[in-house]
Image (spheres, helix red, strand yellow):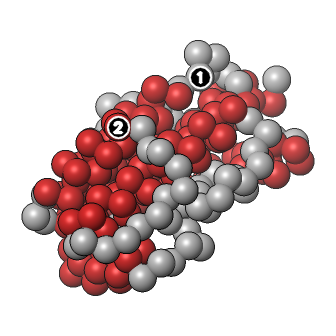
Amino acid sequence: MAEYYLISQLPSLDGIGENTPLPITEERFAELCNSFLGKKTLSEMKNLTLLPMKNQEYSGTSLLKEWNECERNLRLALGKVRAEKLKKPFDTNKVLPAEYIKVANTAIEIDNPMEAEKFLNRYRLELLEALRPMDNFSQDFVFYYGLKLKLMLRIRQFDTDAGEAAYRNIYNSILDGGTEAI
């Protein structure tokens, strides 16, 4: 029941373009969640991340579990394809679905890192949309909304020059065998 009161107060994120200001901040979303959700659900909110760990972590909800697996696969595919392009080893310890390899190949062929990030962000939003719960007043919908908000905020925070430096740093970290966050 608490999810109903929370979700009924949230502005829609559907149909908002990349350059349109968002109708809610992450801080305001967190405040509303703190007002309406119980301790267990708030604890699960800590699992809302755009950077899942390389090794699967526990999540009590199927939406978060599936989102983390999709994002993990995408990041591993990006690392694998980039390493192959540079003729460097990259062990994923698993067979990645062909869809993620195809998306990674497309992304690394885009010369402009900002355009590649926009492409990947659109793909992530499509992935998330495929996970959208049927029940718009459920706990999973709150998690879906939080992840969508994070993705939409992420692309708006990019600064081309700073992004180029961060991109190179992350890229080199992956190739050098960084394993904390992929």
Under mark 1, the amino acid is: Pro
Report the residue at 44% width, 30% height from top: 129
Return the x and y of residue 178 as percentages of the image width and height.
Answer: 51, 78
Find out whether the residues at labels 1 and 2 contact each other: C-beta distance under 8 Å. no
The picture quadrant where one finds residue 51 is bottom right
Residue 98, which numbered label?
2
x, y percentage for residue 172? Answer: 35, 81
Q: Earlier in the sequence, mark 1 or mark 2?
A: 2
As helix, strand or loop, the secondary structure at mark 1 comes to: loop
Q: Position of residue 133 (x, y in %)?
A: 59, 22
- Residue tagged by mark 1? 133
What residue appears at the point 10 percent right and 64 percent down from the top-left corner? 111
Q: Position of residue 179 (x, y in %)?
A: 56, 73
Residue 130 relative to residue 162: left or right: right
Residue 3 against residue 60 in the figure, above or below: above
Q: Residue furthest top?
A: 134
